[in-house]
Image: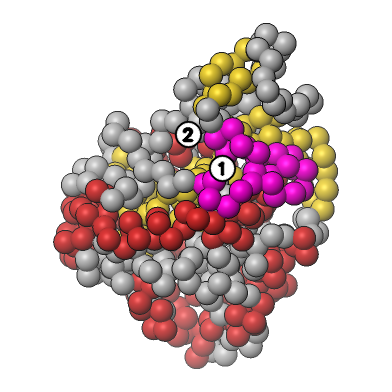
Amino acid sequence: MTSAGLRAADLAVRGGRIVSVDPPGAAPRGEAELDATGLHILPGVIDTHVHTRHPGVPEREDFLSGTSAAAAGGITTLFEMPISKLAVNSGESLAKRAELLQPTALIDYALYGGAGHENLAAIAGQAAAGAIAFKTFLQPPPPTRLDEFFGLWCTDEVLLRDVMRAVKATGLRHCFHCEHTATFQAMQRHLEAAGRTTGRAHADSRPPVAEDLSVAIVLALAEDLGARVQVVHCSSPRAARLARDARWRGVDATVETCPPYLFFTDEALDRLGPFAKCNPPLRGEREVRGLRQCLREGLIEVVGTDHSPFLAEDKATGDENIFLAPPGLAGLEVLVPLMLTAAHHGWIALEDVAALCSENAAKLFGLPRKGRLQPGADADLTIVDVATAWRYDSAGALTKSRANMRIYDGVEMHGRVVSTVVRGAVVFTDGVVTGRPGHGRFVRPEPA
């Protein structure tokens, strides 16, 4: 199954690559065969937005547990964000982190570089070391995590112009967490003064306009500089349409969203409190319907998880004051089932799952051997059963932060991952991780 449609075929694999795509029964017999009769094969899924944060707090996640969860979710390549106790903010730190992750990697992985006002001179070195793209947070970091965010943020638009110019010189895409700091800080102060510190107060402190303002600034600078940019974890349909309008003017601007913004409203914040907290926050019903419409219209290019591991006790710090809880939800294991469910509901076509979760990411980020079911491509395969309906239970999750997946508990899903294949090796099948730690490799973009 690709974005071009569905067809019956046999795939022949040799040396970790697809060597032929043949009519059923026409492929040569192999030493080992995987029977996918009655199932659908997607190009290996690429998750463009992952925070395992390894090396970081191993109780929350390490790279073995994170890539195990990813394999169970049908993900064959993940893009790891630059936040960790070894923050990626220089060529040396990127190379060191790539080396540290490899011994326990079950699947392939790429690394974002960090681009901020503190490390302008180190941006080129990260590209040379193999960064897949760059990430900039347009908000200040938590005061207790300054070491993890050094070189990853910028809140001054004048300095941001210099940061974007430096990233543009590398030729790589520049990805942004877009929320307007002055707006959400003022809103939070107002709500706290009024005694509103639980549930939907979090969403009200970061209204869609805070995201839209930040996106508009990025797009204006991108247009002026000729930069290649991406809005990550987009939750606002107006922000997605701002990016569309910029593309009409010739700006290379793309949009990523995440499943929670398509499946849940801010009602979940009242129901689950900090266990439904993420940034940007969950939106109202109108915005959720609007974002689904943007997906149907092709205004969103990729879907990633923004997997963010926290333990129950971490999230519980916000039980009385949600502003104290760390933001983020875990979601590696439900990316593919949720997107198949979106297709079942008619929000997208089934073939769109291949584009949104595999093909587009490979094209946008310069990975010509990924995201394709064609001869010469890596034999990365996500094999799914689209017919099965089931209800999710986070108790069986492989992430160490399964408690941070409770928002999905009881959700009816239509479609599940049967097997995950990375460069010809089956790393997950029938509910069991079968891959070997160290099979995953560091991948870097190739020149256009």
* Closer to us: 85 or 387: 85
Label 2: which secondary element: loop
In the image, which disc is placed on residue 184? none
Q: Residue at x 22, y 70 (%)?
A: 118
Residue flagged by tag 2: what amino acid is it?
Answer: Lys
Query: SS class of the residue under badge 1?
Result: strand
Q: Which residue is drawn at 63% across and 26% down?
A: 1
- Give the mark nearer the N terminus: 1 vs 2: 1
Percent coordinates x, y for residue 124 in the rendering: 20, 53
- Amino acid carrying label 1: it is Thr
Which of the 4 image quadrants contains residue 265? bottom right
Distance from the alpha carbon under mark 1 to that under mark 2: 9 Å
Choose between 273 and 31: the one closer to the eye: 31
Query: Residue 183: x percent and y percent?
Result: 38, 73
Label 2, on which residue?
370
Q: Is residue 183 visible?
A: no
Q: Magenta region: which residues?
A: 416-440
Residue indicated by mark 1: 76
* Quadrant position of residue 176: bottom left
Left or right of 53, for residue 446: left
Residue 42 image point, x, y percent: 62, 32
Q: Is residue 209 magenta?
A: no
Tell me: residue 434, above or below residue 60.
above
Residue 421 shown in magenta = yes
Considering only vertical position in the picture, is 342 above or below 273?
A: above
**Residue situated in front as seen by the camera: 341 or 37:** 37
Q: Do the residues labelled 1 and 2 touch (CB within 8 Å)?
A: yes
Residue 101 visible at all = yes
Image: 377 above or below 425: above
Image quadrant where one finds the C terminus: top left
Image position of 48 (left or right of 264): left
